[in-house]
Amino acid sequence: MTLDGAMGGAAFLAYVERVLGPTLSHGDVVVMDNLPAHKLPAVRAAIERKGAVLKLLPPYSSDFNPIEMAFSKIKANLRKAAARTLPDLWEAIRDAIDNVTPTDSRAFFTAAGYEPE
């Protein structure tokens, strides 16, 4: 799904219904920041209809935001790849994202103070 312009509530809801929703299973947890589009009741309803749970992060703090730790790892891998052409850059981006493992993700959440329920 591509979008020309800013992501608003209607566009994000379409993303949730068409892209995210079909991948969700009962018991999945969707974690989002506090972008206004993420807090729409229709977005929560679309996620919960799939049996998933929506959790919103607390107000922004880079120290308590696990995505910042993932971004840091991705950027470090991109610097190490030192891609100099556009095709090489896209390949390096794919590889850098793939290098963020489920174990990393759990560690990022733990380091940010989130404990499993």
Image: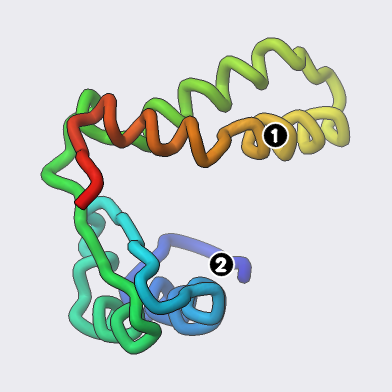
| Apparent side of residue 12 relative to residue 77 in the rendered image (left or right) | left
Q: Do residues under tags 2 and 1 come within 8 Å of each other at their CB atoms?
A: no
Task: Tell me the residue at 34%/74% (across/down).
Answer: 52
Q: Amino acid at mark 1?
A: Ile
Q: Quadrant of residue 41?
A: bottom left
Relative height, residue 101 to residue 43 (above, below)? above
Q: Which quarter of the image is occupied by the N terminus?
A: bottom right
The numbered disc on residue 83 is none
Q: Secondary structure at mark 2?
A: loop
| Residue corresponding to mark 2 | 3
When the figure is inspected, residue 34 is found, relative to residue 83, above or below; the finding is below
Q: Type of residue at label 2?
A: Leu
At horizontal 22% and vertical 24% (from top left) the residue drawn is: 63
Report x, y in % for residue 18. Answer: 54, 82
> 30 above or below 102?
below
106 or 65, nearer to the observer: 106
* Residue 104 x/y as whole percent: 48, 31
Query: Could you tell me residue 32's position as x and y percent?
Result: 30, 55
Residue at image point 20% right, 56% down = 56
What is the number of the mark on residue 93?
Answer: 1
Using the numbered discs, state the Cα–Cα distance from disc 2 to disc 1 in whole angstroms: 20 Å
Identified at 56% across, 65% down, the residue is 4
Label 2 environment density (alpha carbons within 10 Å; few <14, some 14–19, many ≥20) = few
Name which quarter of the figure residue 13 lies in: bottom left
Secondary element type, mark 1 = helix
